[in-house]
Structures are given as C-alpha cells and as structure tokens.
Image (tube, helix red, strand yellow):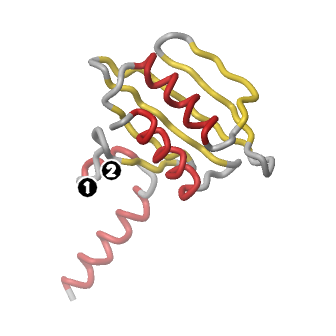
Amino acid sequence: MKKVARLLIVLLSLTVLWGCELALIGLGAGVGIGTYKFIEGELARQYPVEYNKAWDVTNTALSNLQISVAGSLNEGVKGDIEGIRKDGVKVYVSLKDMGQKVTHIGVRVGTFGNRVEAERIHDEIVTVAGI
C-alpha cells in the first residue's frame, strides 16, 4: 500500500510540475551545449559559436532549406528571424549571445511548434557551422 501511495505522489508531482523548466533540470534533464530543449513549441540548443557567426550560419541554413526571410532584427547580442517556408508555414528563430563564444538558438516552426521540422533546421545549422 505504501508503494502505491508513493507512486501516486510521484506521478501527481510530475503532473503538477509538467512544463516547469526548473523541475526538469532538477530531474537531470538540464540543457548544455549539444543538447536540445523543447519548451512550448520552441526547440532550443546552445552552440559553441560566437554570436555573429551563429547569425550568419543561421541565415545560410534557412536559405539552404529554401526558407525565405520575411523579417529580421539583429541587435548584436540577440536577434530574431522570421521566415516563411514554401508551403506558407512560418518559421521563427531567436538567437542570444550567452557569452564565452556560446550562442543560444531557438527554432519554432508553425504556430504551435513542430519538433521534427525544427530539428531539421538545427541539423542544417550544425552542417553549415561545421560543428
């Protein structure tokens, strides 16, 4: 009976904490360089590349995937790119300089996010960056 009660408490705790980034990190799912994180439709990864190179690499990757850039804002330490695929689906990319030649890149494909398509974009970024 105690085992069932403990299991129920753990399951309820995970249900309550679902989506809480702090809880996920506490469970050992922290994000480091080379690890993907999928939160609220955005697939994010930190790259061992300085921000300016990451910006150029991301734009090249989008071009290689035939995603046209509809708008972009580069503030030098953070930036956003809005693109449109040939099928009309919007792509949102955010970049942020994390310091020490590390750049955080988040990709959202579509309104609610499409993990498979976002992974495809990240794979192209890795290819172009040569990492």
| Residue 5, placed above or below residue 46 | below
Looking at the picture, which amino acid does disc 1 mark?
Leu
| Residue 122, placed above or below residue 15 | above
Quarter of the image with the N terminus in it: bottom left
Q: Secondary structure at mark 2?
A: helix
Q: Quadrant of residue 2?
A: bottom left
Q: Secondary structure at mark 1?
A: loop
Q: Quadrant of residue 45?
A: top left
Which residue occupies the extreme bottom position in the image? 1
Q: Label 1: how many residues lie within 10 Å, few (<14), some (14-19) or many (20+)? A: few
The location of residue 84, given as percent across then percent down, is 74, 40
Q: Which residue is mark 1?
A: 27
Residue at x-position 53% and y-position 51%: 120
Looking at the picture, which amino acid does disc 2 mark?
Ala
Contact, mark 1 vs mark 2 (Cβ under 8 Å): yes
The location of residue 51, given as percent across then percent down, is 42, 19
The location of residue 38, given as percent across then percent down, is 46, 50
Q: Which residue is mark 2?
A: 23
Which residue occupies the extreme top position in the image? 76
Judge from the rendering whether residue 122 lies leftward or rightward of residue 101; answer left or right. right
Judge from the rendering whether residue 84 lies leftward or rightward of residue 31; answer left or right. right
Residue at x-position 35% and y-position 33%: 47
The location of residue 78, given as percent across then percent down, is 50, 18
Residue at x-position 36% and y-position 20%: 50
